[in-house]
Amino acid sequence: MTFTTKDFTRRMERALSHAAEAGLTGVLVTPGPDLVYFTGYQPTAITERITMLVLDADHDPHLIVPVLERPDAAAAPGAAAVTITDWADGSDPYAATSRLLDPHGRYALSDSAWAMHLLGLQEALPDSRYTSMTATLPMLRAVKDADEVQRLASAGAAADAAYEQILTVRFAGRTETEVGNDLARLLREHGHSQVDFTVVGSGPNGANPHHEMGDRVIEFGDTVVLDFGGLKDGYGSDTTRTVHVGPPTAEELEVYEVVRRAQQAGFEAVQPGVACEEIDRAARAVIEDAGYGEYFIHRTGHGIGLTTHEPPYMVAGERRPLVPGMCFSIEPGIYLPGRFGVRIEDIVTVTENAGRRLNNTSHEMRIVA
Ligand code: ZN
Ligand code: ZN
Ligand code: ZN
């Protein structure tokens, strides 16, 4: 499955309509996930030489590249959807780029654009204005097309397969890092080209959501948070399950059950038109009602796509509505400092009338050895 010129063109048209709604002249895109989204082009190295896609209502899309990178750009999947313009060393790249811009224009610019490029454009066009792309067009990449959802589903299925296999490895007596390395290997075996994180939070380490993995030896009786993901076929996976080494205590089971119900409540709240913050509220209410509110110390979820963390965020204050095609995590947790933590995370996509999980492994607490 490959994205076509039509897909890239549709994305650029959507960007321009979002930009017009936001009162902007156009959109300026530099290398990174934004440029991959619009053109499929990923320069082998991001350097001081400016590469920029210029989108505005008055011109065809122009991709400005250093002349030495023109052949690579021309071979990109979306090359047919843009006009490629090059500039050579020794010439002024900002003069060349600014000829395509409105001297009084207001542009959204990729967040990851180098400051030197922005400063160069500002000097060339002192009356132009620039704003952050995520600040002004946050929902642009958030709504996925069918092919993107399919890739995210495939990445989710691969992560699920890795999880089923990690349940069969030995936990007790091995370090978190050893188990984490097993997880990373399994993700790669199931088609991931890149592993972004493999959290193994055993015992008290599970109570720190920022803990990745370390030298702690996992013991019989530990609760272990496993949170892992990366990129498969260009799209992200991110799932969390909490397992137990040997039989859990009544308290561990109780906390687990609260998180399981919170995740389910967040999932059941998913529906087009519902505000993102309502997903957070639905999950959080279950945890608060059970008396653990102060131990749920992060937002409920984040978007996922070409990167593993991106808008939309399921967080109080995010009032934008869910739209079919959005894909994001629902990952409530309870963290008891110095003791243990529990988190359950699935990626979910918004359908025409509900949510659909892209992770489908059991939510029952699984016992490992
Ligand atoms: Zn995660
Ligand atoms: Zn996540
Ligand atoms: Zn995260």
Image: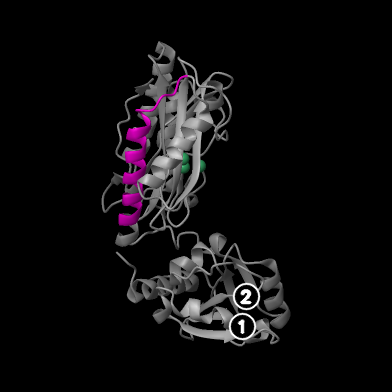
**Dominant SS in magenta:** helix
Q: x and y percent of residue 6 in the render?
A: 33, 75
Image disc number at residue 50: 2
Labels in figure, total? 2
Q: x and y percent of residue 131 in the render?
A: 61, 67
The range drawn in magenta is 150-172
Above or below, comparing residue 99 to residue 16 in the picture: below
Residue farthest toward the top in the current orientation of the protein: 250
- In primary-sequence order, the first of circles 2 and 1 is 2
Which residue occupies 46% across, 80% down? 74
| 258 sits left or right of 50 in the view | left
Q: Quadrant of residue 239?
A: top left
Which residue occupies 69% across, 67% down? 115
Q: Is residue 166 magenta?
A: yes
Inspect this view and state whether residue 155 appears.
yes
The quarter in which the N terminus is drawn is: bottom left
Residue type indicated by callout 2: Ile
Coloration of the structure image: one colour
